[in-house]
């Protein structure tokens, strides 16, 4: 299998599309706090709390590192998020914008000094550039959770850098819920999620483990044809609002198994 190299895309310099965070904020303006999102159990208020608490945690860590102080732990979401959920809607929304601005400024300072910066105590020991991409993906995915399909969302979710980040670093997380529910754990399964003019996303499950890879298109029996935005949604356990965007050549039992494995979170 020929593995495709990662993209050098830097969409923050593309003037034709917004930053993921800015698109999220604009959508948030027309979304009430009690609107039920596509995230199980979450209204918009819980989603804001999730993102704001994560942004503050990253900002706290990077600022401490830059100041030469001990870096605080990132902390589990069960600990971070409850105080944010207790905030009023107006206060929490202002906190989200301030948190994102503080986090982005801290990340930018570190990357300006060293584009390849890695600090073991920040985030999960990933390169700072990867943490930036991770938060971009958070804003893009969770925007879809609020509003579903629209043209801005398709543009954001189609960015190769977001898919590559998931494939490169998040396979364990993306399979965490699905693998224990695998209805046929002893049977290997390899499925290609294919988009025109792009590498295939190869989902492979065997011996109780799941892996993701980007590879050149090749003949295969188990193929799902879709578009780039829908493919990222599928990987994260979502389904586009218009099901016609996803076309499967899989037997029903294999399609159901793939959907179970890619349960998202």
Image (cartoon, rainbow, N blue to C red):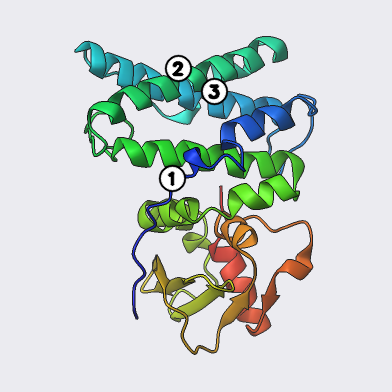
Query: Does 69 appear above or below 138?
Result: above
Secondary structure of the residue carrying numbered label 3:
helix
Q: Is residue 6 left or right of residue 228?
A: left
The reply to whether callout 1 and callout 3 are in contact (CB within 8 Å) is no
Res. 79 visible in picture: no
* Label 1 Cα crowd, 10 Å radius (few <14 / some 14-19 / many 20+): few
Q: Which mark is residue 52?
A: 3
* Label 3 Cα crowd, 10 Å radius (few <14 / some 14-19 / many 20+): many
Q: Name the residue located 61 percent from the left edge and 66 percent from the top edge.
A: 259
Q: Which residue is mark 2?
A: 102
Q: Which residue is mark 1?
A: 10
* x then y, percent, for residue 174: 48, 54
Q: Name the residue located 36 percent from the left edge and 21 percent from the top edge.
A: 106
Secondary structure of the residue carrying numbered label 2:
helix
Q: Name the residue located 43 percent from the left edge and 80 percent from the top edge.
A: 188
Separation of residues labelled 1 and 2 (CA atoms): 21 Å
Secondary structure of the residue carrying numbered label 1:
loop
* x then y, percent, for residue 154: 67, 52
Res. 11 visible in picture: yes
Query: Does 248 appear above or below 238?
Result: below
Q: Nearer the viewer, residue 61 or 178?
A: 61
Q: Examine the image and state in which quarter residue 19 appears.
A: top right
Query: Does 180 appear above or below 257?
Result: above
Q: Nearer the viewer, residue 55 or 154?
A: 154
Of callouts 1 and 2, which one flags the residue occurring earlier in the amino acid sequence?
A: 1
């Amino acid at each position: 299998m020929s593995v495709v190299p990662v993209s050098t895309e830097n969409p923050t310099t593309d003037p034709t599309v917004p930053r993921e965070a800015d698109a999220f904020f604009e959508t948030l303006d027309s979304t009430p706090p009690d609107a039920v999102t596509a995230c199980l159990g979450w209204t918009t208020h819980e989603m804001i709390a999730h993102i704001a608490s994560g942004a503050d945690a990253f900002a706290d860590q990077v600022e401490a590192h830059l100041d030469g102080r001990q870096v605080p732990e990132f902390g589990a979401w069960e600990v971070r998020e409850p105080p944010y959920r207790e905030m009023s809607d107006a206060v929490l929304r202002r906190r989200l914008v301030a948190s994102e601005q503080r986090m982005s400024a801290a990340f930018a300072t570190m990357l300006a000094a060293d584009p390849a910066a890695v600090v073991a105590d920040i985030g999960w020991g990933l390169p700072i550039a990867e943490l930036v991409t991770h938060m971009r993906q958070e804003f893009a995915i969770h925007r879809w959770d609020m509003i579903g399909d629209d043209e801005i969302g398709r543009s954001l979710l189609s960015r190769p850098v977001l898919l590559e980040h998931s494939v490169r670093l998040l396979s364990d997380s993306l399979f965490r819920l699905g693998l224990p529910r695998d209805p046929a754990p002893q049977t290997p399964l390899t499925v290609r999620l294919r988009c025109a003019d792009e590498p295939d996303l190869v989902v492979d499950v065997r011996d109780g483990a799941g892996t993701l890879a980007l590879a050149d298109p090749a003949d295969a029996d188990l193929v799902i044809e879709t578009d780039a935005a829908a493919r990222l949604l599928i990987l994260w356990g979502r389904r586009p609002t218009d099901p016609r965007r996803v076309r499967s050549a899989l037997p029903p039992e294999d399609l159901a198994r793939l959907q179970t494995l890619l349960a998202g979170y």
